[in-house]
Image (cartoon, grey):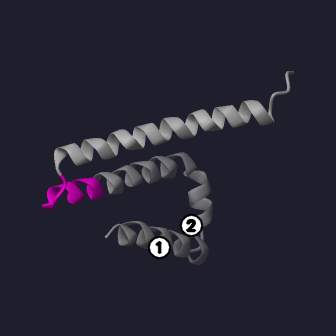
Amino acid sequence: TISLRVLVPVIAGLVMRYRVPGADAFSNEKKALIHKIRERSLVYVVYATFCTTFMQQNDSSATQILVMALSQVILLCAAMVIAWILLFIFFNRKP
């Protein structure tokens, strides 16, 4: 499950950081590399979960999936418009 794919590495990393001597210094030295690995691992977990979900038989039709995706885009655009309006209302000071 996704919780095991995410929680186990996070917990293992935290244990190593605080229990293994030199791990904290190593992670500070290799911060850029670790950042790249973390980003790519997250993309892999999301991709693998997405593929597993859609490889299984489900009762959703193509129309339902399209409506869901379109409604997500509409909700995102609405949230962005509301955020810009509130930004203009509350922070309308000119420099």
Q: Residue at x 30, y 51 (%)?
A: 47
Which secondary structure is most common in the magenta stretch? helix
Label 2 residue SS: helix
Q: 6 or 74: which is nearer to us?
A: 74
The part of the chain drawn in magenta is 48-60
Residue hosting label 1: 12
Q: Is residue 58 left or right of residue 92?
A: left
Figure check: 50 above or below 3? above
- x then y, percent, for residue 89: 77, 33
Residue type, label 1: Ala
The picture quadrant where one finds residue 26 is bottom right
Residue hosting label 2: 23
Q: Is residue 64 magenta?
A: no
Residue type, label 2: Ala
Q: Quadrant of the C terminus?
A: top right
The picture quadrant where one finds residue 21 is bottom right
Q: Is residue 87 left or right of residue 5?
A: right
**Considering only order in the chain, which callout, 1 or 2, is on the residue closer to the N terminus?**
1
Q: Quadrant of the N terminus?
A: bottom left
Label 1 residue SS: helix
Question: Crowdedness of circle 1 by 10 Å Cα count: few (<14), some, many (20+)?
Answer: few
- x then y, percent, for residue 23: 56, 66
Q: Is residue 13 left or right of residue 63?
A: right
Q: Is residue 57 magenta?
A: yes
Q: Residue at x 54, y 76 (%)?
A: 15
